Amino acid sequence: MLAPESPPIVTQQKTRHCKPVARGGARAGRKPAKIRDSGRVQLFGLHAVEAALANEKRPVYAIQATENAAHRLGPLTARRGLEPKRVLPKALDRQLGADTVHQGVLLEVGPLESLTLEELDLSGTLLVLDQVTDPHNVGAALRSAAAFGAKGLVMTQRHSPPLSGVLAKSASGALDLVPIAQVRNLAEAMAELGEQGVTRLGL
């Protein structure tokens, strides 16, 4: 169950005849904004790390893993040209905190590039989040979106959590599976989607 923050909005395409969407959810004539954080991110948990390694668009830099985790991830790390640094679980506890469920692996990655509305596939269902700030809730929403075959998730640039390790762990790999668009103004983005023939449903 998601915490009772602003409810998500589910959208569905009702026509395939679409005109181009202004980038970033902005009106025509406004300069689009593509968001990409330059900082590195630490991902942990087997599903989150497996999905990140399998995502060719995700920059990966270094990995620490226990013997068991390194063995499980071997084909993926080899394909990405990574050699896991073998560590004991306590070493990861010290880095991430004793209460973190890291499952014996820590992957250092670059951030994902935020897409624009124009780059999302409007042929199916999109999930739109309005000021959902808890990373666990956004992660759960991404997990559900992936399970139901959603074509993407739309969220605001502000009043949304960073796409960090906590969110990725909660998403159980879906962070690297579901395309995400971050927009400046959600009301304008929803209006743009409506102009493209997208049916908008508020929950």
Image (tube, rainbow, N blue to C red):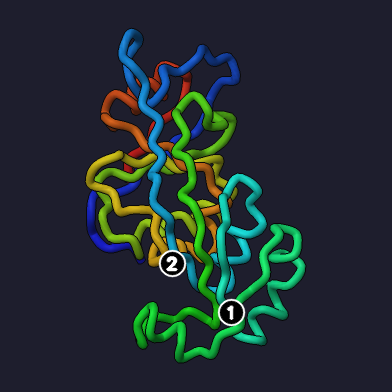
Q: Residue at x 48, y 66 (%)?
A: 43
Q: For this rendering, which residue is in front, 199 or 71?
A: 71
- Would you place residue 150 above or below residue 93 in this image? above
Residue 157 placed where, x, y %? 30, 39
Q: For this rendering, which residue is in front, 70 or 141?
A: 70
Name the amino acid type tagged 1.
Ala
Residue 63 placed where, x, y %? 57, 70
- Would you place residue 112 above or below residue 40 in this image? above
Residue that carries the numbered disc 2 in the rendered image:
170
- Would you place residue 48 above or below residue 181 in this image? below
Quadrant of the rendered structure where residue 77 is? bottom right
Q: Residue at x 65, y 48 (%)?
A: 56
Element carrying mark 1 = strand
Residue that carries the numbered disc 1 in the rendered image:
65
Mark 1 → mark 2, Cα distance in angstroms: 20 Å
Q: For this rendering, which residue is in front, 112 or 7?
A: 112
- C-beta proximity under 8 Å, tags 1 and 2: no
> Looking at the image, which residue sits at the far top?
29
Of labels 1 and 2, earlier in sequence is: 1
